Image (cartoon, helix red, strand yellow):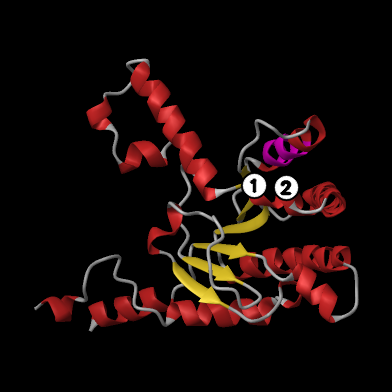
Amino acid sequence: MAEQVAARDAVRAVPEHVAIIMDGNGRWARSRGLPRIEGHRRGVQAVRAVVAHAQKAGVKWLTIFSFSTENWSRPADEVRDLMTLIKLFVRRDLADLHKGGIRVKVIGSRGDLKPDMLAIVNEAETLTRDNTGLTLVLAFNYGGRDEIARAARAVARDVAAGLIAADAVDEAVIASRLDTAGMPDPDLIIRTSGEQRLSNFLLWQAAYAEFVFVADFWPDFDGAVFDRAIAEFQGRDRRFGGVKQEAAV
């Protein structure tokens, strides 16, 4: 009986790490006859609401896909507007995030970031690094393939320097060189706007994540939609490549 209760509670548990692919800002704006930048502005508001709701729900890690390595190919004016919004979000919200005990972590390539953006990233992480509440992970200038390639180069340099034997390279070694080193893999990945693809997001880490795709555009994403996604996750049978005990007998 006790084992059954434990199993039931495990299924109903809040996921430790939720990752979100925020999609549909432009389509939200277009459907209302508004410029795309207005969709992005409303998307920032949705981020604020979801961060607060996730922390209240007991989520420990929340990763949001804020800007991908492929997004640089968008029109220059849209990229400029997005950079402005991201800077404003950090500058305006950082004090509140810090006050709320939220730790900020940024993943993605930093080598080609402009000095002003790099300074903002470093400030956000430094100010909040000792906080013990929800960890908000911003995937910025991030691409899953790029992350894996950078990790592979780091491993190759260590092998060439004699710091590690080639035969000793395993999953743990590679994972320790990823941007997400020290983070738990996502339990749940949510994508908005009805699209059903990863778009180069957390390719390594998503190996055993549960996926929930919602039709809502990101600016319409709120606590109620978040809770429905969590409820769907809690109804899933997570086996991590194994089988249920009763099925194995």
Residue at 62%, 76% (x, y): give it: 226
> Can you tell which quarter of the image residue 53 is in?
bottom right
Eyeballing the image, is 32 above or below 17?
below
Residue at 61%, 42% (x, y): give it: 108
Magenta extent: 120-127
Number of other residues with Cα within 10 Å of mark 2, as a class: few under 14, some 14 to 19, many 20 or more: few
Give the quarter of the figure containing the C terminus: bottom left
Which kind of residue does numbered mark 2 sit on?
Trp
Q: What residue would you read off at disc 2? A: 72
Where does the image place residue 46, in percent across and percent down from the top left? 76, 69
Residue at 66%, 76% (x, y): give it: 193
Which kind of residue does numbered mark 1 sit on?
Thr
Determine whether label 1 and label 2 are within 8 Å by CB.
Answer: yes
Q: Is residue 47 left or right of residue 195?
A: right
Depth order, front residue of 161/5:
161
Where does the image place residue 77, in percent across and percent down from the top left? 87, 51
Depth order, front residue of 133/163:
163
Eyeballing the image, is 140 above or below 188?
above
Q: What residue would you read off at disc 1? A: 69
